[in-house]
Every structure is written in C-alpha cells, then in structure tokens.
Amino acid sequence: MPSVKDRDLQHTRDWILEEMLGHAAFGGWTRKALDASTVNADLPLDMARRAFPGGLPQVADHFADWTDRGMLAELEKRNLETMRVRERIHACVKARLRFLAPHRAAVRRLLSFLALPPNAPLAARITWRSCSVMWYAAGDRATDWNHYTKRGLLAAVYTTTILYWLADGGDGEGDFPDTWAYLDRRISDVLKTFGLPKRMKAILGDALGPW
C-alpha cells in the first residue's frame, strides 16, 4: 500500500498533469507546457520540474499511469464478470478511450513525442504496462508464455484503435461508434489470425471462459 507521502506526491503529479494537458494540446509535449501547468494550479514556478525530475519522459509515464487509474474507475461501473473475454477487452479499451476523450488533442501531441526515436523504449514500456493492466482487469492471471502473448496481441489492437479514434470525428454527441466498431473488427482479426477456436483458447486461457 502506498504511503501518505507517496499518495501526496501522486496527487501533486496528477494535479500538474491535468493542468499541463490543456497547454500540451496546443503547444505540444514540451517543457514550456509543463512549466505553464503551475500558473493555473497556483503552484511555485519550479514545482512541476521538482515533481517530475525525470522531465517529459516521466510526465508521459505518469500520464499512462493516470490513464490506467481512470480506466479502472470507469470499469467499476461495469459488470465484467458477466462478459466473455473479448467483451471484457473491448470494455477495457473503450473505457480507456472514453476517459481520455476530453484530452484527445493532448493525446495526439503525446503520441508525437513518443514517436521520437529516443522515446521508443518508453513508448514500448508504458504500452506493455497498460496492456497488462487491461488484461488483469479482464481477469487474466496467466504467468506462463500466454502472459506475454496476450499482451502482445492487445498492444497491436490498442495502438491501432487509438490511432483510429484520434481520426474519428465522432457522432456529434460525444461518442465514437465507428471506433467501437473498428475495435470489434480488430479483435475479430486477431482471432482469425490465430485460426481455430481451440488454438485461441490455448492462447487466451481456458480459465477465462468461452469467447
């Protein structure tokens, strides 16, 4: 369990991050956007840099963790236990993107930052971690090679879906039905790629129930 000090630091970082997102949406994932976050938050000017001594990569890492927590809060409103595995994974990705919907412009800027060659290891690490969080939320407890296969499959589905979502204009009412349909197709494509249902059960784990 995190200590009071750790919780306070997380709260401070969340606060700074949320203030930064509005600046990053227009100015990019930059030091200037990070420093500007303290203005509206009424914090000391150097607070942002002290909270994130690792700089922008650490902010990106925290953004992924913040999104994981937001997604899990959204999922608490759903009864995942009654769903098939593919429905649980769909629900996880959908909850994640719905949580991020108010910050789409900042997400686009973040992806541009993560696409820079020096940030490739960071991008891979936080994508893998978030996919692991999604699988765990979906009920997966695998520790063998299935653990890695599942996360690799989900990483491919999630990364392509988020790119589709960023280009999706939505339905005009704040929802993204085209993206959810695309997500369904991507999940189906993964199933087809691995052939027979028995093969998929071996990969995804019989303990999680039928697809």
Image: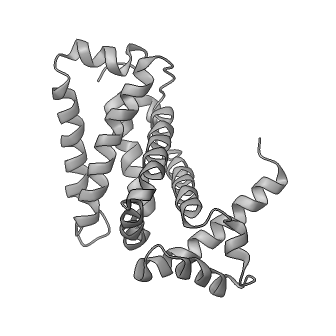
Observer-nearest of 77 and 197? 197
Find residue 47 and report its horizontal and vertical position in percent: 73, 76
Observer-nearest of 208 and 141? 141
Does 203 sit above or below residue 102? above
Q: Is residue 173 visible?
A: yes
Find residue 120 and report its horizontal and vertical position in percent: 41, 52
Residue at (64% x, 65% y) in the render: 14
Horizontally, residue 32 falls left or right of residue 158, namely right
**Residue 86 appears in which quarter of the rendering?**
top left
Find residue 2 and report its horizontal and vertical position in percent: 77, 46
Q: Residue furthest front?
A: 118
Does 135 sit above or below residue 204? below
Q: Is residue 176 visible?
A: no
- The quarter of the picture where the C terminus appears is top left
Residue at (51% x, 33% y) in the render: 136
Observer-nearest of 47 and 11? 47
Q: Residue furthest right?
A: 4
Does 106 sit above or below residue 74? below
- The quarter of the picture where the N terminus appears is top right
**Residue 50 appears in which quarter of the rendering?**
bottom right
